[in-house]
């Protein structure tokens, strides 16, 4: 992968963590934050949907309310509404400053969850996402690869109560996992990282990918 630079694009680098439920995205995002602070790289760590007031409110509806029955198209539109605010209020200001932005989920999640998982037309989902994101494309997706069953077992062991998406059933989640793998096979910005193992083991794999794929951004970061 050829790393985009501020000189070429006029913006900072944009990295996204993705993966099925229980793959460890949130844990790895926090660990990345600690690592980046230790090596002095200016960055913003955020999540999507979220990161803005309207995004957090939408997150409460689409994820934190498992009792709600939300039609697939409504779900898609809500996620995209949150993305529009996220891009305008969070992503653009950070990237325009030339700083690193790390997000827990972005457009790849929409394709996997609403496209593959909910069965919505992928071309239409891509078109609508392009409108909502203003054409913003991450430089790198780090996709934590873990079987759905293993991810759910992790959550159960941790005593985590499933959100609305996680409560959609094993068939839905397996379609999401299949979607991620198929998308990774066709999207050159996606790098698979084995998410099996301890958090420290997975973190080391992620750091290796970041240094390899984006050396200018992570050159000052060492083990």
Image (cartoon, grey):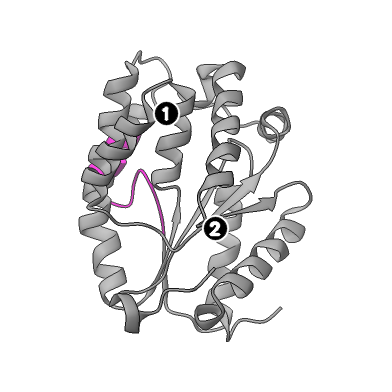
Q: Circle 2 is placed at which residue position? A: 29
Q: Is residue 57 magenta?
A: yes
> What residue span does the magenta drawing correspond to?
46-59
Give the SS element for disc 1: helix
> Quadrant where the C terminus lies?
bottom right
Q: Is residue 164 left or right of residue 24?
A: left
Whether the magenta-drawn stretch holds residue 122 is answered as no
Q: Is residue 125 left or right of residue 45?
A: left
Q: Nearer the viewer, residue 22 or 116?
A: 116
Task: Give me the residue at 73% from left, 33% from top.
Answer: 150
Q: Residue at x 53, y 77 (%)?
A: 37
Q: Residue at x 77, y 59 (%)?
A: 201
- Which picture quadrant has residue 136? bottom left
Residue 42 drawn above or below residue 118: below
Q: In this view of the protein, can residue 176 be seen by the observer?
A: yes
Give how far across and how far down residue 190 sits, in percent: 54, 54
Is residue 210 positioned above or below 134 on the image? below
């Amino acid at each position: 992968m050829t790393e985009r630079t501020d000189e070429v694009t006029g913006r900072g680098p944009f990295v996204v963590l993705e993966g099925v439920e229980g793959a460890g995205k949130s844990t790895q995002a926090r660990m990345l934050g600690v690592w980046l602070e230790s090596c002095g790289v200016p960055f913003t760590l955020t999540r999507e949907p979220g990161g803005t007031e309207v995004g957090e409110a939408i997150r409460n509806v689409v994820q934190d309310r498992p009792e709600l029955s939300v039609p697939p198209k409504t779900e898609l539109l809500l996620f995209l509404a949150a993305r529009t605010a996220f891009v305008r209020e969070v992503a653009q200001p950070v990237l325009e400053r030339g700083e690193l932005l790390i997000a827990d989920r972005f457009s790849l999640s929409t394709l996997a969850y609403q496209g593959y998982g909910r069965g919505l037309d992928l071309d239409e989902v891509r078109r609508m996402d392009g409108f909502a994101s203003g054409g913003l494309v991450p430089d790198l997706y780090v996709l934590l690869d873990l079987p759905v069953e293993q991810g759910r077992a992790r959550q159960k062991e941790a005593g985590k109560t499933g959100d609305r998406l996680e409560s959609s059933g094993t068939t839905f989640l397996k379609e999401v996992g299949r979607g991620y793998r198929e998308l990774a096979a066709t999207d050159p910005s996606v790098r698979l990282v084995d998410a099996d193992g301890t958090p420290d083991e997975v973190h080391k794999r992620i750091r290796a990918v970041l240094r390899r794929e984006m050396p200018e951004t992570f050159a000052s970061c060492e083990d």
